[in-house]
Amino acid sequence: MSSINGFGTLYYGWRHAPDGTATATQWACAFWVPLLPLRRQRLRIASNLAQPTLRSHLGGLVVSQTDTYELLDTTPLQLPEIAATLTKTYLGLPALLIGPVLLAGVALLAARQLGLDTTPGSPAFTVYVGLGFVGIVNFLYQAVRAIRRARGWQPRVRTPHQP
């Protein structure tokens, strides 16, 4: 499995088992966004997820990512997992990314309705800018987290390197 600048194939919908194996759906992706489910597979992660596998080419214009998995079995696609992945991607992610900006706009409108000063440098404007900053940081955090999850990383669980 590999991707170049987020184009290629990635795994989403990971379900990790106690025995060190996992099931995941392989997706055709663009900009790390899942577009089409290809197959569901049971596999073992052979890459060391603690080490970055990104490679830069052409002065950083092209970034490639290659991870290695031991394929154990192919299983049928699961409609609930596909629906969950699509819902998280096309509804949840935009809500996470746009939510802070909308909240900031609502807060600024509410401050104006209350008659508060909303000119640059005022406390209300500072809150507005702060919420916008939180939105940007959240966007970057969620993007990195989604890419790591597509590689098989589990939050709060260390995956030992499989030689």
Image (cartoon, rainbow, N blue to C red):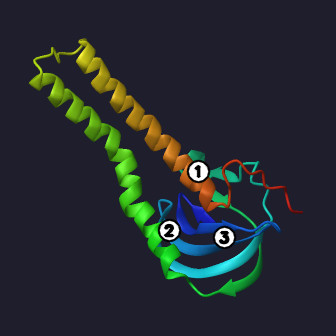
Tell me which amino acid carries mark 1.
Leu
Task: Return the x and y of residue 37 as percentages of the image width and height.
Answer: 51, 78
Which labelled disc corresponds to residue 1? 3
Mark-to-mark CA distance, 2 and 3 = 11 Å
Left or right: residue 51 compared with residue 30: right
Quadrant containing the N terminus in the rendered view: bottom right
Left or right: residue 88 compared with residue 2: left
Which circle's residue, 2 or 3, is located before the other in the chain? Answer: 3
Check if mark 1's residue and mark 2's residue have beta carbons within 8 Å: no
Task: Return the x and y of residue 43 as percentages of the image width and height.
Answer: 74, 74
Q: Residue at x 46, y 35 (%)?
A: 137
Q: Is disc 2 surrounded by few (<14), some (14 to 19) or many (20+) residues within 10 Å?
A: some
Q: Residue at x 28, y 37 (%)?
A: 103
| SS at badge 1 | helix
Q: Pick whichever, 65 or 21, lies toward us.
A: 21
Q: Pick whichever, 39 or 108, lies toward us.
A: 108
In this rendering, is residue 133 above or below 69? above
Task: Return the x and y of residue 95 as percentages of the image width and height.
Answer: 35, 51
In this rendering, is residue 59 above or below 132? below
Which labelled disc corresponds to residue 29? 2
Provide the residue designation for mark 1. 58
Which circle's residue, 1 or 3, is located before the other in the chain? Answer: 3
Q: Is disc 3 surrounded by few (<14), some (14 to 19) or many (20+) residues within 10 Å?
A: few
Mark-to-mark CA distance, 1 and 2 = 22 Å
